[in-house]
Image (cartoon, helix red, strand yellow):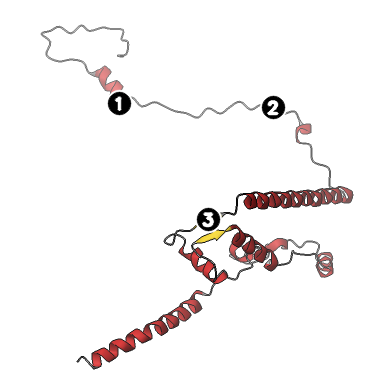
Amino acid sequence: MARKKEDLTFITPDAVGHDFEDDDYILNYKPVIEFVEPDIQPDDGDDFFEPEPPATLDSLRTRTANVIEGYKAIKKLTDLAQERIDQRVAAAGGLEMILDPNVDSHVIEALKRKFPDEDPTKITYDMYRNCLDAQRRNQPDLPVVTGEDIRAAKADPYRTDFGGLGNTGGQNRAEISSPANMVKPINISSFQTTVVKKLFEMLTPLISTLVLDLMNPF
């Protein structure tokens, strides 16, 4: 829409030129966007930010006891869920998961090592429970606060490096410091050396036959 003007000009059919001022305004219009600061709402005074009362020894003990009871309740629920899952699997006649040799090759190789007498291309429910039991047996002990720790805390009440905060960079990663990782990682260099030796031992009979054939072509 063209801008309103005080003086209107009527273009006659015989006129040679036209006024493109309005069109130029539309094509080159640039809006001005400015930040408008919102109104500041007054607060309710100092009472709006009431500080929490300092924790007492009894309140900390109560909170700790509640956390322990909560963990005990979770354990009971997980045991009940496991029992019901076992019953359903038994009623269904078992449970199997088929593996793809191309996608799950690393899992198949692990099953060959763990269950050499079983079919490595599938995971049964009994194999799954066997692995869970082995993981439970091999898991590390839970951290326990010892008397030495208490004495160290009394000697240095400003100590703040609990829970791994004193470790250097890179040592708090889950794959290194997590207690769930009871299986040690593979030494890649040693593994490659061992695999290359075994591969050469497997190829030795073929290489020997090839060498003998080349030495005695007739």
Q: Residue at x 73, y 66 (%)?
A: 141
Q: Secondary structure at mark 3?
A: strand
Q: Residue at x 22, y 7 (%)?
A: 9
Q: How far from the left and from the top, in percent, is residue 186? A: 54, 72
Q: Are marks 1 and 2 in contact (CB under 8 Å)?
A: no
Q: Secondary structure at mark 2?
A: loop
Question: Could you tell me how far apart the alpha carbons at marks 2 and 3 are, in whole angstroms?
Answer: 63 Å
Badge 3 density bin: few <14, some 14–19, many ≥20, Cα 10 Å: few
Amino acid type indicated by mark 1: Asn
Badge 2 density bin: few <14, some 14–19, many ≥20, Cα 10 Å: few
Q: Residue at x 76, y 30 (%)?
A: 45
Front: mark 1 or 3:
3
Q: How far from the left and from the top, in percent, is residue 59? A: 86, 47
Amino acid type indicated by mark 3: Met
Q: How far from the left and from the top, in percent, is residue 39? A: 61, 25
Q: Is residue 134 visible?
A: yes
Residue position for label 3? 97
Residue position for label 1? 28
Question: Could you tell me how far apart the alpha carbons at marks 1 and 3 are, in whole angstroms?
Answer: 66 Å
Residue position for label 2? 42
Q: How far from the left and from the top, in percent, is residue 121? A: 48, 62
